[in-house]
Amino acid sequence: MLLSVIVPCYNEEENIALFYSELLKNNEFFKSKDLDIEVIYVDDGSTDNTVIEVKKLRESDERVKLISFSRNFGKESAIYAGFKKAKGDYAVMLDADLQDPPSLLPEMFSYIEEGYDSVATRRVNRKGEPPIRSFFARRFYKLMNKFSNTDIVDGARDYRLMTRQVVDAILSLGEYNRFSKGIFGWVGFKTKWVEFENVERAKGETKWSFWGLFLYSLEGIIAFSTAPLAIASCLGVLFCLLAFVLIIFILVRSLFWTDPTSGWQSMVCIISLVSGVQLLCLGILGQYLSKTYLEVKNRPKYLVKEEL
């Protein structure tokens, strides 16, 4: 049988060879299970020597494969490209920075043998991460589980081992705006969760900024929940009721007080608040409309510059 190892990478020249050597520490395990492997590096338009490092590995091992994008299309596109090119009976996706330990593969495969369709991993802590990032990450997972029907576990990684059936199910979702953590939960199947302590990057720095993670979280909420639209509608009804109450209050007040200039400060505050809520609701609607616009254009999720 064949195991496809999918490795999305962006400017990871320092980690390409390190990841490969760590993966091959499982060679005895692969032989014991009669597993062949293919290692698919998906270069997401790197500007360093990532492609050159992968080609060096391929010179000595034909199991190493390369998909190089014409530009940076994002990790979600790299994940999709890796799954699409994977030919294995099983597929596993790991980050090239070694924050997803390849040493967990034997344990993960044992659960597949027990009958699980997918084995997912989650971090039990966020040691080494900035506290502010950890705080917002936890809030995001709580919001997602309240707003959507998709099961997304706090601390979940993209590191998953899957059967061919699960991979085909993921590929059947051809949407342009992709959020893999949500897709993994949406397709279902029998899943086992494996916990591990947070591992810091082997070399280099993370490519995710706080702003980038914030936009990615918005992508996940919009992709798997219509709750923000419902919230916008509820706010509209609430402020209509509030306006009705204020109208009655002003009519009654005008019968007893005739000062035409009183209350202008509160009026300015009310107008500012209502305007802000209107802009918020328009922004929510605009986000959903923009995603629909991108889907309708039906552009390819990525363009391949080179493939080995």
Image (cartoon, rainbow, N blue to C red):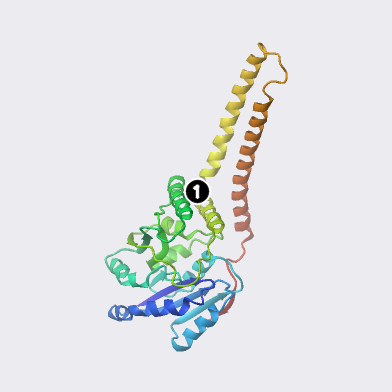
The one nearer the camera, 60 or 207, is 207
Label 1: which secondary element: loop
Residue at x 43% of width, y 78% of height: 18
**In the rendered image, the vertical position of residue 194 relative to residue 40, given as above or below:** above
> Which residue was labeled with disc 1?
225
Residue 157 location in percent, x, y?
A: 42, 62
Q: Residue furthest bottom?
A: 60
User: How many labels sit on residues?
Assistant: 1
Left of 165 or right of it: where is 222?
Answer: right
Residue depicted at x 60% and y 66%: 300
> What's the residue at 43%, 48% (across, down)?
142
252 relative position to 228: left or right: right
Label 1: how many residues lie within 10 Å, few (<14), some (14-19) or many (20+)?
some
Quick check: 262 above or below 106? above
Q: Pick whichever, 287 or 279, lies toward us.
A: 279
Residue 21 locus on image (x, y percent):
40, 80
User: Hey, which residue is sitting farthest right in the picture?
Assistant: 260
Seen in the picture, residue 63 relative to 219 is either above or below; the reply is below
| Residue sitting at x 63%, y 43% | 282
Quarter of the image with the N terminus in it: bottom left
Residue 133 spot, x, y in % from top left: 48, 55
Position of 185 relative to 7 (above/below): above
Q: Nearer the viewer, residue 58 or 261?
A: 261
Residue 189 pos. (x, y %): 36, 59
Which of the 4 quarters of the picture holds residue 69? bottom right
Amino acid carrying label 1: it is: Ser
